[in-house]
Amino acid sequence: MFPAWRFKVVERLSTETLAIEDRQISSALQFIRDHACDPVTVADVLKAVPMARRTLERRFNQALGRSPAA
């Protein structure tokens, strides 16, 4: 048997994703992540993932427990 110290956790790209069934919210999150170093506004997210602002806010809150602005 191998000693425990020989094994380590390897972080992979799949570690960075969240399992969200709502495809539009998942796309919005991907847009936010892709532009994390840019000054992104909710309006920018809505241009990338067209929907009503209130719908985005409600569904984002349902999926993540926070607003898109947060």
Image (spheres, helix red, strand yellow):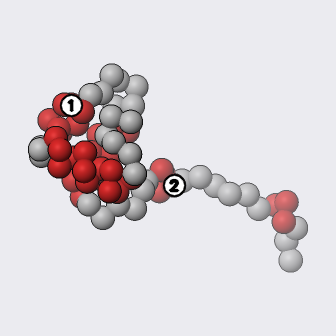
Element type where label 1 sits in the image: helix
The quadrant the N terminus occupies is bottom right
Marks 2 and 1, how far apart at CA:
26 Å
Single out the mark in the foreground, 2 or 1.
1
Image-based side of 4 in relation to 27, left or right: right
Residue 5, quarter of the rendered image: bottom right
SS for dot 2: helix
Foreground residue, 61 or 23? Answer: 61
Q: Position of residue 37 (x, y in %)?
A: 40, 25
Q: Is residue 42 left or right of residue 20?
A: left
For this orientation, the residue located farthest to the bottom is: 1
Q: Measuring 25% from the left and 50% from the top, which residue is drawn there?
A: 58
Point out residue 2 in the picture as x, y percentages from the top left corner.
85, 71
The amino acid sitting under disc 2 is Thr
Nearer to us in this view, 61 or 43: 61
| Residue pictured at 88% horizontal, 67% vertical | 3
Q: Which mark is residue 15?
A: 2
Query: Sequence order check: which comes first, mark 2 or mark 1?
Result: 2
Name the residue at 33% across, 42% down. Answer: 67
The numbered dot on residue 44 is 1
Depth order, front residue of 6/28: 28
